[in-house]
Image (cartoon, rainbow, N blue to C red):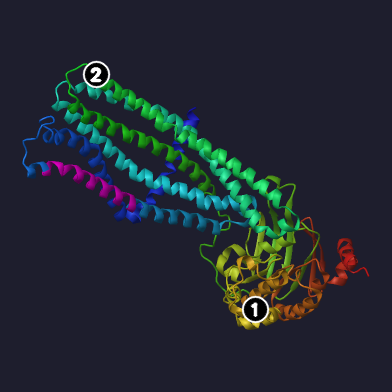
Amino acid sequence: MKDSKEKSSVRVTRLLPYFFLLKPLWLPFTGALLCGIIYGISSGFGLPFMMDQVFPKIFSNKGSSPDLSFLELAKYVGWFPLVFVIRGVSGYLNTYLINLCGIKVLEKIRVQVFTKLQKLPLSFFQKNQEGDLLSRVTADTGQLQTAVLNVSNDMVRQPITFLGAICALIVISLQNEGMSFVLVCLVVIPICVFPIRRIGEIILRKALGMQEMAGDMTAVLSENLSASREIRAFNLEQKEIKRFQNASKEYLWARMKVIKYSHLLTPIIEIITAVGISVAIFQASRTSVQLDAFIPVIMALYMSYEPVKKLGSIQNQIKQALASIQRIDDILDVDEAIKDASNPITTPISGNIEFKDVCYFYDNSNAKNKPAIRNLNLSIKAGEIIALVGPSGAGKTTLAGLLPRFFDPSSGRIKLDGVNLTDYSLKHLRESVALVPQKPFLFNLSVLENIELGHSAYSNKTVTESVNLANASDFIDLLPEKLDQNLGENGNRLSGGQIQRLAMARAFYKNSPILILDEATSALDSQNEETIHDSMKKLMKGKTTFLIAHRFSSIKLATRILVLNFGKVIADGSHDHVYSTCDLYKSLYDRQNIV
């Protein structure tokens, strides 16, 4: 029990840093709080006091014509709309300004989470569903923003309303003989603390489950939208609908549990406060207190109980926000792992690479059983064209991914031109490596903009030249807007081969001293493959190149072949040497060249 309380206390303190996001917004936020204070005073004190002091003067003769002139009557009656004008204007300005701050806070939280995602290693994204991350960046940040703003606002507005009502209640009770018993009815307020606390603990658990269900549902949706072609090809429409229905239903029930408990608090507090008001009415009926004198007291009691109900709602929002914070902090607290050099080296890179006792494990829990790279010792001279050959899972892509520091070795060192990779700035290092992956990604931009994303300090060709090198000019010239043609999301307006060639054009334009071609010709037909091979020879000249390919037609371009199996280099040399000494390579080669 003690540990649970300490854990809850720690969680509540985790909400505090987010309030500091309001610091740059101090002017509109201060205005919102001042308007909230005015609203609270006009509601909690103004309305009951007006009923107690103004109404008796208007209706002093109990139904007969009042002994007031027209101007005096108009003055007293004017208090009624005046109080509501002050209350209405201050309430509106409070709501408007607090929402203005809320939009800006939401932007800061989302940008903070998004910025963190840009710094996390690829291993983080391999362990987390894309849809769940989307839910954290959108739904969870929105929930946190709502809590920060509402708590900041109501923690001023509601206590002021409460204190105003208490002051009015005290003044009215002291002015009217025999009404001091009303103050005893306020004892029900501390009783409200118990259901507020208990329900808040339940909501925290239920809200966390609800946010996780929201993430699962978004994950199903994201996966479905990303696999539209496969779903139609395998007739998975009904199966996907059922899967989404199940995820949506689970989220619905999780949400209903939060709604059940968050809205349960209001009637509980109303029942408790109704008991307090009933006691006051019962006691008043036994005394000589008149109805017209007692009505302001009832209003003041109600206005003192209402903020307690609102503060209970705030407690519920805090608990829901803590559930969101836990999910957001799962991102913000992740070790970035791939850290930039404090004093980076920025000298030009030529491409000499050395691996020294390098090991890499994708999952530390299985480090002893499933290393992706094992005790790799390797020296590569600048300008060498290295073909990485081996069965799937041999570690080819992992080895190449270590160069741009998509992940760092679990042990050992990698040197580039005699300098540890970690001593280069990430920007400078990654500018020096051009990558064409097996499944390239094109952004929802024009052809020109997609290629220009590859611009680096090494770029020395025009976009047109890069397009020609990639053998992509033929289909680009057929596009309605040619280089200015928008490609749609992930290049969905192009074929697989066209996407691959544009990705190559981007690498050509980047012109980095190190190239990684991961199945770069896999989507090309045999006719275009020969043309691209001629272009690739020109591109690879003088550059350190890693060719990852299962097609031996591409491997023939290499000057050196490395055969990997289970993360280890088992053969190293020319085609003839490796073919004669490595059974694995021989079997892979022969399998593709059987006539």
Q: From what the image shows, is residue 185 above or below residue 375?
A: above
Please name the residue shown 27% across and 23% down the image. 185
* Label 2 Cα crowd, 10 Å radius (few <14 / some 14-19 / many 20+): some
Q: What amino acid does circle 2 point to?
A: Gln
- Is label 2 or label 1 in front? 2
Q: Is residue 66 left or right of residue 233?
A: left
Q: From what the image shows, is residue 447 above or below residue 41?
A: below
Please name the residue shown 62% across and 44% down the image. 247
Q: Position of residue 277 (x, y in %)?
A: 29, 25
Q: Label 2, on which residue?
A: 283
Instruction: Verify whether residue 476 appears in magenta.
Output: no
Labels 2 & 1 near each other (Cβ < 8 A): no
Which one is in front, 39 or 138? Answer: 39
Q: Position of residue 58 (x, y in %)?
A: 12, 36
> How far apart are the alpha carbons under marks 2 and 1?
87 Å
Q: What amino acid does circle 1 point to?
A: Leu
Q: Is residue 128 visible?
A: no
* Label 1 Cα crowd, 10 Å radius (few <14 / some 14-19 / many 20+): few
Please name the residue shown 73% across and 78% down the image. 536
Q: Label 1, on which residue?
A: 479
Start-end of magenta stretch: 74-96
Instruction: Verify whether residue 94 appears in magenta.
Output: yes
Secondary structure under badge 2? helix
Q: Magenta stretch mostly in which secondary structure?
A: helix
